[in-house]
Amino acid sequence: MTMDTDEFIKRLAADLQPVRPLRPAWTRALLWMGIALPWVAAVVWNKLMMVDVVQVTADARFVVEQAATLATALTAAIAAFRSAIPGFDRRILLLPLVPLGIWFGSVGHGCVQDWVRLGAEGLTIRPDWDCLPMAAIIGIIPGAAIVAMLRKGASLHPRVTLALAALAVASAANFGLQFAHTRDASIMVLSWHLGAAAVLSALGGCLGDRMLSWRPAHSLVP
Amino acid sequence: MGRNVGEWQNLTLLMRAAQAGDSRAYSELLRTLLPLVNELVRQRYPFLQSQDIDDLVQDILLSVHAARATYDPTRPFLPWLRAIARYRMADSARRYALRTANEVPSEHAPETFVAKDANMSGNGYGDAEALRQAMAKLSYGQRQAIELMKLQEMSLKEARVVTGTSIGALKVSVHRGMSALRKALRSTK
């Protein structure tokens, strides 16, 4: 059954409700960080209180990695929010690659240094499942918040959007986890932290259609 | 779609007013979009019948309606509209392909049971004229709710977007409309 298009337009326009345009992507990303970071801090609070600020800031590599991790979370969130707006500029998808590259490069450099210093022993990957429960807890609120915020948009590429959102959540969680346990060898950070971020992003990509699919209405086409 | 810059700026202004709830501006916007969207659909699917084109155009306008909060008035209108139109056309084509992939052409409808009731045509209510008259007697709100949710199979949330009424009001309209239809059709038997 098809309505006359004129009548259809009349009905759409009748009793039109005002809508508030979505805030710019960077504002929404900052808002999300405002939700995610206090939660991350709350989960690792006990460990955070024991951090020796002088010692931490003296470790240049740690500072660079943490800054890159945080920047990855922010830029991935910006890209995710922007990708949920129809007609977005696709170059925005490249934005998280810059801090992600710095993060990856710094960890990779650490791996090489460990290998030079300790040989094969410096590149041994050990099981680190103890971290998993805390990582899951850290990710709950930031994950739920970003999905809820993204659902207010109209993601025409839900796989890309959710993969970016997952990268943002994984990066924010990694930022907190780095304070929560003793300084890991670079190979452990590479395999468990960056690896987890990659797995989570891939999972987000697979679930994107189910979680963010935008179907405003059933087709009228018979 | 060779329009001048002033016309596109006008679309942005109309959409901004529509976002603020100005239904006259919104109506003007949709009417301005109509030939543009028509052109987009005809370019992509030149083989479609005009009825199917109308359906697809309405689908796209409905999507524009649902996504209107995502439009940023500081950005160009056309890329936003084109992205929605492309998505909707691809989505329709995908669903059409899925539907036809599961269809098996058959000259004879398989008979299930001998009983007359089990072999009625699946095309809907038998007396179309009685149904049309019963629908016409419904109030506008009830008729709209039934058309959207029963005939077009929209969910409550989707119907709420189109009608702008609350989910509770839609439930009431469907419930009362269906009751009135049942009563009217029973009396015609």
Image (tube, coloured by chain):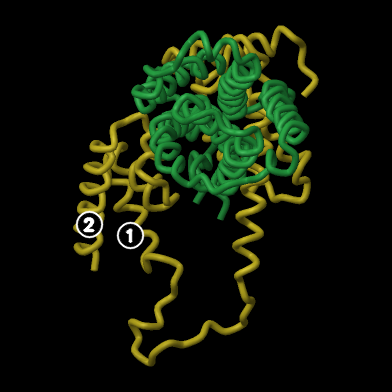
Chain colours: A green, B yellow
Give x and y (percent) for residue A198: 63, 40
Q: Chain of mark 1?
A: B
Front residue of A84/B77: it is A84
- Label at residue B184: 2
Q: Tell me if label 2 and label 1 are in contact, CB under 8 Å.
A: yes
Q: Residue at x 34, y 57 (%)?
A: B131
Q: Quadrant of the C terminus of chain B?
A: bottom left
Q: Chain of mark 2?
A: B
Q: Residue at x 40, y 20 (%)?
A: A48
Label 1: state its secondary structure. helix
Residue on which the image places disc 1: B130
Label 2: state its secondary structure. helix
Looking at numbered disc 2 in the image, what kind of residue is underneath it? Ala
Please give the count of numbered marks on the rendered protein: 2
Give x and y (percent) for residue B149: 37, 48
Q: Quadrant of the N terminus of chain B?
A: top right
